[in-house]
Image: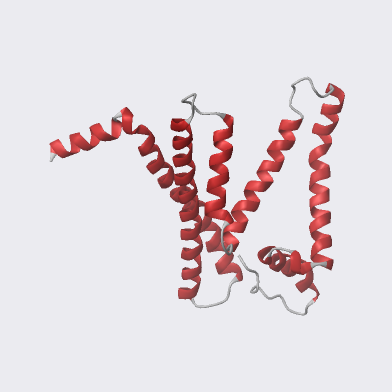
Amino acid sequence: MNGIKKTIENTVLDPQFADLFAIVKGARNGFTYGAKIRFPHALVMVFLFRSGTLREKLQIILKATFQHARNLATFATVYKAMMLCLRNTSTEGKESSSHTFLAGLVGGYMVFGRGIQSSVNQQIVIYVFARVVLALARLSVQKDGSIPPEFRERVTNNAWPVFAALSWASVMWLYRWHPETVQPSLRSSMKYMYDLVHLTHWPLHGVES
């Protein structure tokens, strides 16, 4: 028994298998993180705003949690595997900036871009997109000498207020005049906050997670 444990330990710690185990650990960490993020969110949203039996609610929670965890695990696997392949086939034999973009492109298409998309997938992609926009905005005003300091300071101080105001102005306009274009869960939440207040009762159901 000790011999088997020693063999497994030596295999795991062997540098020649480090990249392969990194893929496995990436999948594990992606699944764990996805479950931790989605489960409490789904639990709150379903029990507060969904109707149905306890069994039905639990099924919805577990389905959303598994889908979120599975997709992050799958993306991590594809991304790490692509990075390994690109690095090993590179003429320089090392990682380049294009590798991360290509690996993310392939993983994003395979996991989040194909077929009919669930609300879970849409939420993940929209979350990532929002963070990308903010990161690119910060990158555009970095101190590289290409932007005058006065202009950079003005952009840095005013970009977020303008972004926040335009975001809320746009979503309220869209919801009021083109509600069919708004993502269903957001549309349902906005209906609960802004339209149902005109009714004579206060329903708690009807908001989708």
Colour convention: secondary structure
Residue 36 vs residue 105, the one in the foreground:
105
Residue 73 vs residue 185, the one in the foreground:
73
* Residue 9, above or below 112: above
Residue that appears at 72% across and 69% down: 192
Q: Is residue 101 left or right of residue 198?
A: left
Residue that appears at 54% across and 46% down: 106
Residue that appears at 46% across and 64% down: 62
The x, y position of residue 112, in whole percent, is: 56, 54
Residue that appears at 46% across and 55% down: 70
The x, y position of residue 79, in whole percent, is: 49, 42
Q: Residue furthest top?
A: 145
Q: Is residue 142 left or right of residue 1?
A: right
* Residue 50, above or below 169: below
Snapshot quadrant of residue 200: bottom right
Quarter in which the C terminus is drawn: bottom right
Snapshot quadrant of residue 25: top left
* Residue 14, above or below 69: above
Quarter in which the N terminus is drawn: top left
Q: Is residue 98 left or right of residue 158?
A: left
For the image shown, how many numbered marks are present on the structure?
0
The x, y position of residue 187, in whole percent, is: 72, 66
The x, y position of residue 64, in whole percent, is: 51, 62
* Residue 19, above or below 190: above
Q: Residue furthest bottom?
A: 200
